[in-house]
Amino acid sequence: MFRRVLIANRGEIAVRIIRACRELGIASVAVHSTADHDCLHTSLADESICIGPPAPAQSYLNTPAIIAAAEICDAHAIHPGYGFLAENAKFAAVCRDCNIGFIGPSPEAIALSGDKAACRETVKAAGVPVVPGSEGIVGGSKGAADTKRAVAIAKEIGFPVLVKASAGGGGKGMRIAHNDVALQNAVSMASLEAQSAFGDGGVYIEKFVENARHIEFQILADHHGTTVAVGDRECTIQRRHQKLIEESPAPGLTTALRTKMAKAAVRAAEAIGYTNAGTAEFVLAPDGQFYFIEFNARIQVEHPVTEEVTGIDLVREQFRLATGERLQDTEVVTTGAAIEARICAEDPEHGFVPTPGLVSRCHVPGGPGIRVDSHLFSGYNIPRYYDSLIAKVIARGRTREEAIGRLAGALQEFATEGVKTTARLCARVVKSDRFQRGDIDVKLLDDFVPKGN
């Protein structure tokens, strides 16, 4: 096992990794920007190193600064968490070249899964069903966006269609189009947004599956040829392709469908040549047909719900797998249900505008079956430079109904003075009749936010 690990991230995921290091007897080293000098992860780690100004590109995305920090503290490995450098194949390759362990998959697997158009074709060749769409990109990274080709593809597969950034993530570089004119604009706008966000304007097209559900499977894979699906998650409650509420197991899946999807998830991971922890994501149509959409080469924000129903510490498994150990839990058993609500420093009543600032007082709920992953504390000044996620409230129950009741109560109790959050919105969603019935699709959140938001 690694003796000292540098955590190339911030906020709640950095805190989560530090705690896993502590349990494993690993010394942890935090990095931070000047804006994060008093963030919780800097005080919990065994050591903390400042790596630059507030701007992410000058700190958390600054490969030379992070590698230098790892060399200064003699770190044996780097854990990238999620976001920032977690899916950066070049960063993983630099770690390998510098003989620094990378807690994640190989650079080659990251590169393939990160090129969503190429990944789609790879898993399709392995027999995994994919959404009908373009083969490869329709312009952007290799020249001007080819709107004529895009229109021809859309007419072949039928409107509506979804334009997606090949190098995308987090809902950026995505547009829905219902006709020719809208599609031409969507291709151009998505390409520009993708270029700005990811440095790659390549986009591709998929059939937009209406009233779909978003189902994903947690994957663990070792370096000895063993790959397993560690439970499924329902991630359908989203706003503009950003997940808000997730649960495990996904409600309403038959045993046969769950088994079929799990096998497809494993085939996708094996086709990519994946190792460590990752996630295969699918859309599930109302008729029961499912389609692969992408593979996330990192630990997911929503990983706690899988941990709660399986008893498997996924971050601990990441460390074990990165050192070359074999998978031990190949027959995974899930019990009960777990639901997670993401709490963001945003104002849902006014377009979800970010609400950074001083948290003069906060109250984090507790009680049976309640887990809170957060970096909040009274007196914390939320910076304006980073993602607005400040906490994840997770509830576990013997049944889905019990988990919902516990989560609703915890969300009502969650309080932050000085900043507005999404906690009350999440409480309204989970207490709604539709959610409690499991009558879920990607449009459900529209019933809970003001029109235009």
Image: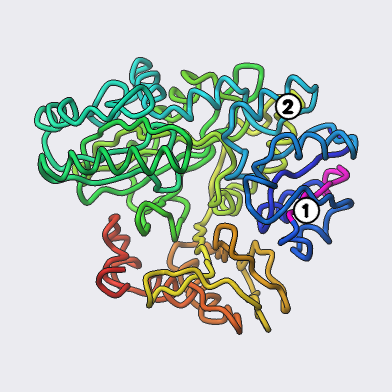
Query: Residue at coordinates 56% horizontally, 63% vertically from top-left?
Result: 394
For residue 362, above or below residue 267: below
Query: Residue at coordinates 32% horizontally, 60% vertically from top-left?
Result: 438
User: Does 28 appear in magenta?
Assistant: yes
Can you give x and y, in whole percent of width and height, for residue 385 in the image?
59, 59
Can you give x and y, in whole percent of width and height, for residue 251 in the image?
37, 54
For residue 276, above or below residue 135: below
Q: Quadrant of the C terminus?
A: bottom left
User: Does 368 appear in magenta?
Assistant: no
Q: Is 332 displayed left or right of 366 in the figure?
A: left
385 or 346, nearer to the observer: 385
Residue 239 visible within the image: yes
339 or 184, nearer to the observer: 184
- Where does label 1 land, which residue? 19
Q: Residues within 10 Å of mark 2 (few under 14, many from 20)?
A: some
Residue 1 visible within the image: no
Type of residue at label 2? Cys
Type of residue at label 1? Arg
- Where does label 2 land, which residue? 95
Can you give x and y, in whole percent of width and height, for residue 451 in the image?
25, 72
Q: Quadrant of residue 330?
A: top right
Q: Is disc 2 placed on a helix, strand or loop?
A: helix
Disc tally is: 2
Query: Residue at coordinates 62% horizontally, 39% vertically from top-left?
Result: 85
Q: Quadrant of the N terminus?
A: top right
Q: Is 374 displayed left or right of 243 in the figure?
A: right
Mark earlier in primary sequence (2, 1):
1
The region drawn magenta spans 22-33
Q: CB atoms at circles 2 and 1 under 8 Å apart?
A: no
Q: Residues within 10 Å of mark 1 (few under 14, many from 20)?
A: some
Query: Residue at coordinates 75% horizontally, 53% vertically from top-left?
Result: 32
Callout in the foreground (2, 1): 2
